[in-house]
Image: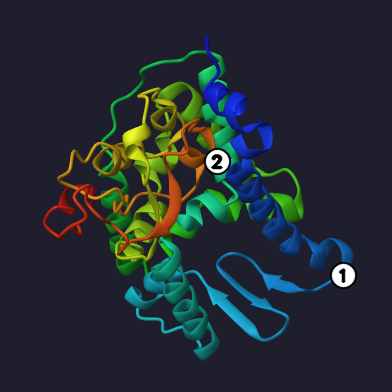
Amino acid sequence: MIKVGADAIAEKGWLAAYKWLILRRAAQFGILALFLLGPLAGVWIVKGNLTYSLTLGVLPLTDPYVTLQSLVTGHVPEKMGLIGAGIVLVFYFLVGGRSFCAWVCPINPVTDAAGWIRRRLNIRGGAQLSRATRYWILVTTLLVSVLTGSIAWEWINPVSMLHRGLFFGVGAGWMIVLAVFLFDIFVTKNGWCGRLCPVGAFYSLLGRWSQVRVSATKRTACNDCMDCFEVCPEPQVIKPGLKGGGVRGPVILAANCTNCGRCIDVCSKDVFNFGLRFNNPLENGAQATPQSAAGNK
């Protein structure tokens, strides 16, 4: 079996073929390290967790999804919590809502590892779950929050479970993380992040109009190797930009693109790069219209 990205490694070298993946792992583990420095080493750069944190005693950051659940229960967060949610909302509006999933979420390395094992074991097929399922789960968590008066998703949130496990050691929370790992290996490819996780669904709505986007700028150089589709956690987002056929511009406008950069890494022809959503010309030099880009969303 030919290794995915082998051509990119041969053309660009190993480091260039894994550049964005390495940067993502550095961001993910760096953020975890900042949270762990306080409890483990007494160095309190960041206090809290991904639900709410205070950096250097002045910068509040709040999960807007948790804030929304709190609001629908009738509980208005304190001023710092609302400010923190506003900061996060603005940030992900600019850089892409689902960038959280690829660059911050600590479950992402778990599901990526499951995907790697799935490829190594050559496991194909699996349960057919609609990608819309995550949106139904998102709505359900809000309804349950309304009915119970509590932040419902935190009962089973794997991110929170993983954080607690790192702080307090082995516990029931690790079983949920393990379940996510095994689900992605044996049940369906990219099953958790791509089909079930309401956090990703929420952030996709938040980043629907975000400015930073992956673009298939050199799509005419594509040799149809399919490596980008193989490594992309949301492969359905690639085709409109890559195969626009003069009807759609090269920018990937789909809300579920995670801006992970793996398509950039594994492409030996350097078809993809990061850019801005408005830099979306058609082959004839015209700008893609909202109508022509509608299929990307």
Label ID, residue 176: 2
**For residue 220, side relative to residue 79 (left or right):** left
Report if the CB atoms under discs 2 and 1 are less than 8 Å apart. Answer: no
Question: In the rendered structure, which amino acid carries the disc numbered 2?
Answer: Ile
Give how far across and how far down residue 187 sits, in percent.
42, 24
Residue 210 placement (x, y as % from top left):
36, 65
Helix, strand or loop for disc 1? loop
Which of the labelled discs sits on residue 199, or is there none?
none
Q: Secondary structure at mark 2?
A: helix
Position of 260 relative to 9 (above/below): below
Residue at the location (37% across, 25% down)?
223
Q: Select label 2 or label 1 by which is in front.
A: 1
Q: Quadrant of residue 265?
A: top right
Find residue 250 and report its horizontal and vertical position in percent: 29, 48
Which residue is found at the position 15% from the left and 61% from the top?
290
Judge whether residue 156 can be spotted in this image. Answer: no
Which residue is located at x 42 percent, y 69 percent? 94
Res. 292 visible in picture: yes
From mark 2 to mark 1, how far is it between C-alphas? Answer: 29 Å
- Find residue 160 and report its image quarter: bottom right
Total numbered labels placed on residues in the image: 2
Mark 2, Cα crowd under 10 Å, few <14 / some 14-19 / many 20+, is some
Which of the marked residues, 2 or 1, is nearer the chain's N terminus? 1
**The residue positioned farthest toward the front in the image shown:** 284
12 relative position to 219: left or right: right
Q: Which residue was labeled with disc 1?
A: 42
Q: Residue reaching furthest bottom? A: 79
Seen as rendered, the residue at the extreme right is: 41
Callout 1 amino acid = Gly
